[in-house]
Image (cartoon, helix red, strand yellow):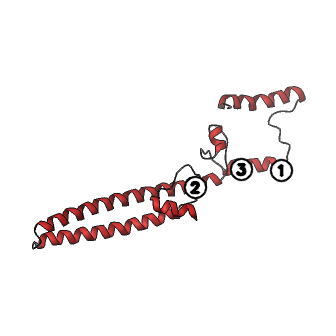
Amino acid sequence: MVSRLSSYLITDLCPIKVYETTGIRPLYKHGHISDNIVRGVKRKSEYCSICLVCLWTDSTIKVNNHHKALTTQDAKIESANKKLRAAQVAIDRAEARVAAAHKRTGVNPDSEKFRDDFEQAEKSRVNAGNTYSKALDASIGTIGMGSGHIMVLLPPHVANNAERK
């Protein structure tokens, strides 16, 4: 693996050797179209740590705009994963609330307060289920996106169906 210091030294020494042997200065522009192409690529790019080339060289080279798209897709995957986790926590909390309300209603079935609590718990479970299904659809929509460094969070039954498709 080439370190940053040695890569700078190699690039700095080559023009000096050329100047010593031929008398051509390092800043000489020969007017080839590749100079314009390289300058344009450098202008439109930024440092990135996504592709294997960037990881291998410790992000010392400039990369193309494709990596910018990969980072935004990775951010979408992270956001979908975060929403799916939060929705799962909300479902678990709502089901615990329904179980507790059901237990209280079973103790005193004539109490209107306990029945109202049970209905509220049922509503919160339905709302949490709707939120979870939306978050799951968003996560399914991110399958095949990104750089591959961030995995899509899916429940096992959905992940098995996604693999078959």
How far is disc 2 from disc 1 in space, using C-alphas?
A: 33 Å
- Name the residue rendered at 67%, 42% in the picture: 53
Where does the image place residue 164, in percent across and percent down from the top left?
57, 63
The correct choice, above or below, for 146 with respect to 35 in the image is below
Q: Is residue 164 visible?
A: yes
Q: Furthest-right residue in view?
A: 22
Sequence order check, earlier mark of 2 and 3:
3
**Residue 160 shown left or right of residue 82 in the figure:** right
Few, some or many residues within 10 Å of mark 3 (<14, 14–19, 20+): some
Q: Quadrant of residue 108?
A: bottom left
Few, some or many residues within 10 Å of mark 1 (<14, 14–19, 20+): few
Specify the amino acid type for callout 3.
Val
Residue corresponding to mark 3: 41
- Name the residue rendered at 41%, 67% in the picture: 133
Disc number at residue 146? 2
Q: Quadrant of the C terminus?
A: bottom right
Residue corresponding to mark 1: 33
Where does the image place residue 41, in percent across and percent down from the top left?
71, 50
Q: Is residue 59 visible?
A: no
Query: Judging from the image, what secondary structure is the residue with disc 2 in?
Result: loop
Query: Judging from the image, what secondary structure is the residue with disc 3 in?
Result: helix
Query: Judging from the image, what secondary structure is the residue with disc 1 in?
Result: helix
Where does the image place residue 134, in percent across and percent down from the top left?
42, 67
Specify the amino acid type for callout 2.
Gly
Sequence order check, earlier mark of 3 and 1:
1
